[in-house]
Image: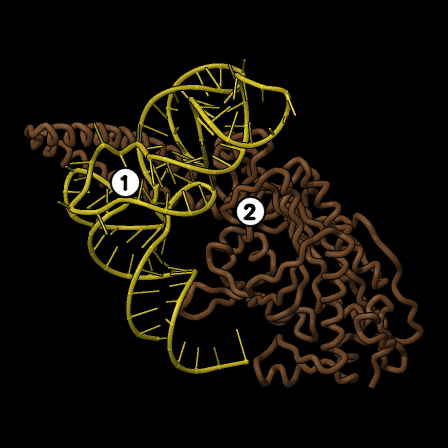
Amino acid sequence: MLDLKFVRENVDRVGQMLKDRQMAMDLKPLLDLDEERRRILGQVEELKHRRNLASDEISRLKKEKQDASARIDEMREVSQEIKGLDQELSTIEQQFRDFLLLIPNTPHASVPIGKDEKDNPVVKTWGNPPALNFEPRPHWEIGESLGILDFERAARMTGARFALYWGMGAALERALITFMLDMHTQHHGYTEVLPPFMVNSTSLLGTGQLPKFKEELFKLEGRDFFLVPTAEVPVTNIHAGEILEEEELPKLYTAFTPCFRSEAGSYGKDTRGLIRQHQFNKVEMVKFVQPETSYDALESLLLNAEAILQALNLHYRVVTLCTGDLGFSASKTYDIEVWLPGQNTYREISSCSNFEDFQSRRANIRFRRKGQSKTELVHTLNGSGLAVGRTLVAVLENYQQDDGSVLVPPALRPYMRNLEKIQK
RNA sequence: GGAGAGAUGGCCGAGUCGGCUUAAGGCGCUCGCCUGCUAAGCGAGUGUACUCUGUAAAGGGGUACCGAGGGUUCGAAUCCCUCUCUCUCCGCCA
């Protein structure tokens, strides 16, 4: 959510920002609603002031055993008027809020203007594709032939876009999770948290998944519970409604959760393999920082995610999302794309974003500077560190051997009883 | 699932036949005084949001907020309804 005062004073800038994002949106209705809101608010507060004064007087008259019926009659009318205006006001405030919640965040000045993902500039590349002297196979073939991935049975017990992991496949996924969490907690300064895997609608409103992206979510029938689409939601909401002390910042959290996404609108896309699942595992990093440090925090967040890929010796590149590809809540986002030789392409494996105060305004997450009385909104950031399923895909495809086996990356061996190779 | 109790400011905790409660009192915190230092003692202050006004900054006025939402009333922390959460006991259960 944007700051209303900012929108009021920068209508043109916000309008341009929406254009940059390839979104058509007229801000005029919002400003009209705001004006109307303040007009009625002034009236109703004036009447309430009168009512409060009269209330004291009535109380005093009664105590002195005098007749107060004239005042009471008078106030009866005022009260009716207040009731009417209050109703009008709450209708307008609802509309106003609904509107404000649908405006995306403003991109940072360093975000390149562009139409779609083709305009995302590559900002860095690390490592090299593995030297394979044979035709590399896609991970679903490797996984199925090794008997560690089973899409057929998963489809039978649940449906499309689910996977059953067997044996060393399951162990590899588990090793990756533990490896990532250990790296972030032991070397990057994050505190591990394990949040609920379901959240309520207020939390989803806070991080920006609601109201706009309802169709992406799985909701439990008859309850205000949603399966988490990412750990970002519960973890960012840990401090919803709180006022933090400056010396507590920055707060760095890392969490493993499964993620559940309906993938509505992506029918026919990435139908094979683990790339696009309704359920996948992810290790997430979340930061709460002082505003003036948030862009440095974004760079270090990115490095924290890159460190995982480097430790696994997986070739990747980093792109900056252009205005047309930037997510709704983000001010700036880097995507890390890992090389997948089996598919001869780079695939997104991490997304690291600075949300500035967009989420903290929605979720009401503030802090107080030392010696200051007024509160300020914190900046929130998060990034995948990493998407576990896709990391497993990258390991299978990059570490495949011509005999059909897969080497275990040395960094993971301690987590897999020193197993060097997954084979039949 | 059954029965009961509860939710008040940073914390503890009063306040239900509605109106001197502008939320008592205590603790904590901040500032000041006092004292070789510390502690104790004394004095003052101590929430959030919106809004109007004003400004270099400040300040001042107003409204709302006693778990959430709705209702009754001239007036609600207080009465009524719905919901959420917490606690105790019973049952079931990993």
Eyeballing the image, is A192 above or below A329? below
Depth check, front residue: A28 or A422: A422
- Which secondary structure, mark 1? helix
Any part of residue A192 in sight: yes
Q: Residue at x 91, y 76 (%)?
A: A134
| Picture quadrant of residue A82 | top left
Q: Residue at x 75, y 68 (%)?
A: A176
| Picture quadrant of residue A309 | bottom right
Cα distance in 3D space between marks 1 and 2 = 29 Å
| The C terminus of chain A: image quadrant | bottom right
Q: Residue at x 74, y 50 (%)?
A: A302
Percent of width and height locating residue B10: 47, 42
Eyeballing the image, is B46 above or below A138? above
| Picture quadrant of residue B91 | bottom left
| Residue under numbered circle 2 | A359
Q: Residues within 10 Å of mark 2 (few under 14, many from 20)?
A: many
**Which chain is depicted yellow?**
B
For residue A342, side relative to residue B88 (left or right): right
Check residue A181 in the rendering and tell me which mark sits there, or answer none.
Answer: none
What colour scheme governs how the chains and residues are painted in the rendered image of this protein?
by chain
Q: So how many labels did they put on this image?
A: 2
**Of the image marks 1 and 2, the number of the one nearer the N terminus:** 1
Looking at the picture, which amino acid does disc 1 mark? Asp
Chain at numbered mark 1: A
For residue A236, side relative to residue B55 (left or right): right
Which colour denotes chain A? Answer: brown
| Residue under numbered circle 1 | A86
Looking at the picture, which amino acid does disc 2 mark? Gln
Depth check, front residue: B78 or A137: B78
Chain at numbered mark 2: A
Any part of residue A28 in sight: no
Eyeballing the image, is A232 above or below A18? below
